[in-house]
Image (cartoon, grey):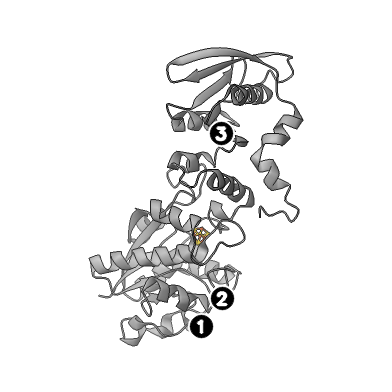
Amino acid sequence: MPKAVALYSGGLDSTLAILVMMKQGVDVTAITFLNHFGCDISDKSSCSKDPFAASVKFGFQVKLSHLSDKFLEIVKNPKYGHGKNMNPCIDCRVLMLKEAKGFMDITGADFIITGEVLGQRPMSQRKNCFPMIDKAAGVKGLVLRPLSAKFLPVTLPEEIGLINRDMLLNFTGRSRKPQMALALEYGLTEYPAPAGGCLLTEPIYSFKLKDLLTYNADPEYSDINLLRIGRHFRFSPECKIIVGRHDAENEAIKLLAGSEDYLLRAEGVGSPLVLLRGKTTDEALTVAASLCARYSDAKKLHEVDVAVLQGDKKYYMKTQPADNEMIELYRIEKKAALQPDGHAF
Ligand code: SF4
């Protein structure tokens, strides 16, 4: 029985690619690659992807693999450049195929499959991109893209008769209608709405990440994880302030806070949790406390008591809620939103 390793996101296309191969009797093991910029698959409220749902229904294995440092490196220094925002899509595909090749060698699989559809994404799914990506990943001829295979050169598994090319497909472009029709045929009824890509394709997120990397070339993972939470303010090159927007974000900030960070909360009223990270001065603490008061239920008061915690230390500050000018001065997202073309850079 031919064996394949599948790049698997849990989305419609990558599921269909697997089902098309299974129909030809291929034993497929799927790998879902994780990074710090994708959706959190353990949090069903923030993400509709569940890589295990279809695998249970259709009977294929899914392995999870976190790309961690390797992924961060291509975000910082992509060989093939960023897309419109901070997304290094070509480097990302190369990295995932390299990792899949390693897995293929360990498990004795014959080839790799992906759910890519020709012309669906502008950066990495163009016809001339596929051979370039495969070559860069060292998997030339070994990557079968079943959904668009009829438009693509014959691959090794087709050449040696493991796969019947006549049973492969000719999908192209951005329309999902052919995929949806095929999903019906397979009885694949539940799948996530098509996603636009990872967080790195979002202008405001990308702006915050670029700000972080500008001032800290070697951020901790907690710095990166904080980017998806709260309102972000840059006080100085060495100091950031993050304000929770609701209880769940306040909890997340508490979990991500380190022993050196300051946490601030307005006392006795509904209040955000505010995190101050980096080189802390009295002025930075004053700004953080003002922001805390401004986003609390006491924002209309002239003076607000704000509790400041750092490790075992706790003390109070009296502060005035921040005005719009202060917010404009420090808020990172606001600067992104003000970019004239609507893109971060
Ligand atoms: S959108 Fe993100 S996860 Fe998808 S290929 Fe681009 S960089 Fe990789």
Q: Residue at x 39, y 52 (%)?
A: 69
Question: Dividing the picture into quarters, in which one does residue 167 lie?
Answer: bottom left
Return the disc, 3 or 2, that comes first in the chain's sequence.
2
Amino acid type, mark 3: Cys
Label 2 crowding class (10 Å Cα cut-off): few <14, some 14-19, many 20+? some
| Vertical arrangement, residue 275 with respect to residue 57, above or below | above
Give the residue at mark 2. Answer: 172
* Label 1 – label 3 distance at C-alpha: 52 Å
Q: Is residue 322 left or right of residue 110?
A: right
* 149 and 105: which is toward the camera: 105
Q: Residue 302 in the image: state x and y as whole percent.
A: 74, 14
Amino acid bearing label 2: Thr
**Residue shown at 41%/76% (left/top)?**
135
Q: Residue at x 45, y 67 (%)?
A: 16
Q: Secondary structure at mark 2?
A: loop
Q: Which mark is residue 239?
A: 3
User: In this picture, is 199 found above or below 313?
Assistant: below
* Circles 1 and 2: CB atoms closer than 8 Å: yes
- Mark 1 vs mark 2: which is more N-terminal? 1
Between circles 3 and 2, the one closer to the viewer is 3
Q: Which mark is residue 32?
A: none
Amino acid at pointer 1: Phe
Ligand 1 under 8 Å from disc 3 Cβ: no
User: Callout 3: few (<14), some (14-19), or many (20+) C-alpha neighbours within 10 Å?
Assistant: some
> Can you say whether 20 is above or below 235 in the image?
below
Residue at the spot of label 1: 151
| Element type where label 3 sits in the image | strand
**Which x, y percent locates residue 247?**
55, 28
